[in-house]
Amino acid sequence: MPFKRFSPNSSPSLSRRRWLQAAGGIVVGTGLSGWGTPGHANSLTVGAPAPPLVLQTLDGREIATQALRGQVVVLTFWATWCDPCHEELPLLSAYAERHARDGLQMLGFSLDTPENLPMVRKIAASLSFPVGFLGSAYAGGYGRIWRLPVNFAIDRAGRLAHNGWDDPAPPAWTTERLERFVTPLLRASR
């Protein structure tokens, strides 16, 4: 499915959060509670080529995951209204800063709408990795983002190394989970 951008003009009466909920629901910081995995998320396979995705950063750059081959890439999906995200983002930022020289690139996709830009910028300023708006409830081959936070890891060869949809609740990453899933990828030969 091609990457589609969210247009605030498409439904001016709905906030981004309500729009995402209306588009199929978002579960923040909890498990599925009986919901199926939406979108293309069912087709994600660890070890298979990772779906391409482009981050449109707040400062106007475009960072394509395919251009980062040779690095370990972590995609993190978050929002200003997601309490578990507020706990996870500083942890991810510290980890990204600590491992930048090891070939780690973290990309932060905010599910906020442009009217929340001041708050997104404030949070992004405290992070050591680039942030941008996702622009849609859909993240290409990663499917519809229906739960926050959710994270994916891509190895140096461009293969999906961690599928965030397989994470149990609560889905937020911890130091132990980063050490278990991402650190071994960083130790793999460049």
Image (cartoon, helix red, strand yellow):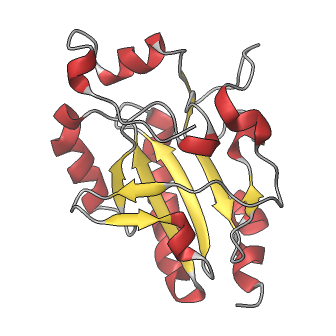
Q: Quadrant of residue 125?
A: bottom left
Q: Residue at x 21, y 62 (%)?
A: 59
Q: Where is the N terminus found, in terms of image quarters?
A: top right
In the displayed structure, 187 sits above or below 75; it is: below
Query: Does residue 149 sit above or below 23 in this rendering?
Result: below
Furthest toward the front, the residue is: 2
Q: For residue 174, say whether it is visible.
A: no
User: Which sits in the foreground, 115 or 33?
Assistant: 115
Left/right of residue 148 with respect to residue 110 in the rendered view: right
Q: Nearer the viewer, residue 37 or 10?
A: 10
Quadrant of res 144 = top right
| Residue 177 spot, x, y in % from top left | 72, 58
Residue 132: x and y in percent read: 33, 52
User: In the rendered picture of this protein, how many numbered marks are placed on residues?
Assistant: 0
Viewer-closest of 124 and 7 = 7
For the point 69% across and 77% down, the residue is 156
Q: Return the x and y of residue 163 as percentages of the image width and height.
A: 73, 49
Residue 14 vertical placement versus 134 (above, below): above
Q: Residue at x 74, y 75 (%)?
A: 185
Q: Residue at x 55, y 40 (%)?
A: 149
State left or right for residue 135 relative to residue 107.
left
> Is there any visible trace of residue 6 in the rendered image?
yes
Asked where in the image residue 78 lies, by quadrant, the reply is: top left
Query: Left or right: where does residue 185 sit relative to residue 100?
Result: right
Q: Quadrant of the C terminus?
A: bottom right
